[in-house]
Every structure is written in structure tokens, then in C-alpha cells.
Amino acid sequence: MSALAASPAAVEPVVRARNVHKAFDRLEVLKGIDLDVAPGETVVILGPSGSGKSTFLRCLNHLEAIDRGSIEVDGEQIGYRWHRGRLEALSERATTLQRRRIGMVFQQFNLYPHMTALENIIEAPIGVHGERRAEAVRHARELLDRVGLGAKADSYPAQLSGGQQQRVAIARALAIRPRLMLFDEPTSALDPELVGEVLATMRDLAGRGMTMIVVTHEIGFAREAADRVVFMDGGHIVEEGPPEAVLGNPQHPRTRAFLGRFI
């Protein structure tokens, strides 16, 4: 659990989501989500499949456009701007620039197979953000060391295990020096014996004070690393609080039923 996490009321939040709605055709997936995330806080989102967890995560960096409500990261609307008293959609280029502050790790590793681990990590800093190659390479090697893969810089994805590929994906997301990291079930595609190495990397990030929102079914990680656990069901936040409260003494029947499958 992050030593740097503070109460959302004590400082300006990194994330401020208000009344977020999202539907796909007639299926309403998010039904008015409110959530603040403080600097350095690790928030774990739990819930059954179809509860809206991953959709909400994708809305946070505008991979999905919300239908109603607002999302701010560092005080700035994501994907929109205020113009003459109303929200106006930004261009894709402007939204891409906003995403510079948000790193995201997906279920699938999505590494470029024709690039080495190092080349995968430096691609966005150089190609998208205009960083000098020497600095991008230095930072990439530092990140590979941090995730325990310093010796794998010249390895291609096919030469790495699934856990190693996911740790490269984490390093790639960190390479843009984000203010916020989003994890969408980062261990769900891994064999069970490889899950631990990825969770250890994520615990290290939490301990370093990285602001993180993690969608996962890893209850042990939530108990050990989260500052706050959020339980979603049916497009709503049903319950939230410290892990010892939500996991140890859940108040809502849906939370109790869900956790009963794991605990």
C-alpha cells in the first residue's frame, strides 16, 4: 500500500469522475459513476463480468467517449474542453496529447513482435512525444531494471514468457512518465505460475507512490496493495472503502455474494 496516498479530501484529486454514463446501443453500461482518486493512491476495482469496470477504465483515457458526465485528470477534462459554457469534443491529436499523462496496461500485452523489449519501450517516447533517443533508451533501460528484466532488453516478445511480456508492457506504459496508471485485468491472460511476478511489479509501483487504478480479480493484491477497494455491479459503484472494510466486512449483499466466491 502506498505510503504517499492521502485522503481524497486532503488534496486535489488526480482523477475526478462525476456522473459518468456510457451506453452501447441500448445497453447502458455505466449509470452515473462518481469517483475521486488522490495522488499516490492505489484504487482496486472489483466486480462481476459486465459490471462496467473495464468500460469505466477505458473512459478515463477516452478510449471510449462518455455519453454524459465529466472526467478530469489533473484538473483537465479528458477528450473535451469547455467552450462558451459547454463541453466541446477535442480533436484526436489534442486527446492524444492529453493521454501523455495516462499509462494503460491491458489484458493482452500488445507488444510489437518485430521489436525488441527495448524498442517496444522507446517507440512512444520517441515517435509520439519527441523525446531524444539517448534519453529514451536510458530511461527504458532503467525501467527494464525496475521490472526485473534488465537482461532482456534485446529479446523479442516471442522469446519472453507471458509474465515477462506483461512486465515489458508495464515498462512501456511507464516510459511516457504518466501521472496515472490504469491496469485492466493485467494478469487474466497469464498462466497461474506467472501471475506473481506481474503483481510484484505492481506492488512496487504502488509502494513508490504511483497513482493507480487497477481492475482485477486478484483479491490478495487488493488486500495487500490497495488504499481503497471499489466494488461495481450493474454499472454502479455499490460499495467502496479501505480493503479491510470492503473485503473483511462487506456491507452490501452483492459484495458479499461476489467475495464469497474468492474468500
Image (cartoon, rainbow, N blue to C red):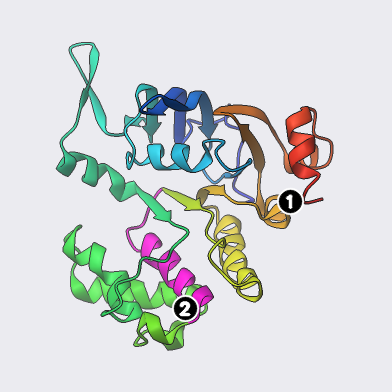
Q: Residues within 10 Å of mark 2 (few under 14, many from 20)?
A: some
- Residues drawn in magenta: 161-179
> What's the residue at 51%, 25% (across, down)?
33
Q: Is residue 246 above or below residue 31?
A: below
Does residue 224 lie above or below 96 as drawn? below
* Residue 183 visible within the image: yes
- Of labels 1 and 2, earlier in sequence is 2
Quarter of the image for residue 23 reads: top left
Q: Is residue 68 left or right of residue 9?
A: left
**Number of other residues with Cα within 10 Å of mark 1, as a class: few under 14, some 14 to 19, many 20 or more:** some
The residue under label 2 is 145
- Left of 118 or right of it: where is 249? right
Q: Element under label 1?
A: helix
Residue 105 is situated, as x and y percent measured from the top left of the image, at: 44, 57
Give the residue at x 35% y 73%. Answer: 140
Number of numbered tags placed on the structure image: 2
Residue closer to the observer: 184 or 85: 184
Image coords of residue 70 (percent x, y): 38, 24
For this orientation, the residue located farthest to the top is 85
**Can you identify the residue that label 1 sits on?**
223
Residue 1 visible in the snapshot: no
Q: Kindly identify the residue that appears in the image at 40 percent across and 61 percent down.
A: 174
Comparing labels 1 and 2, the label whose residue is closer to the camera: 1
Q: Amino acid at mark 2?
A: Asp
> Could you tell me how far apart the alpha carbons at marks 1 and 2 are, in whole angstroms?
26 Å
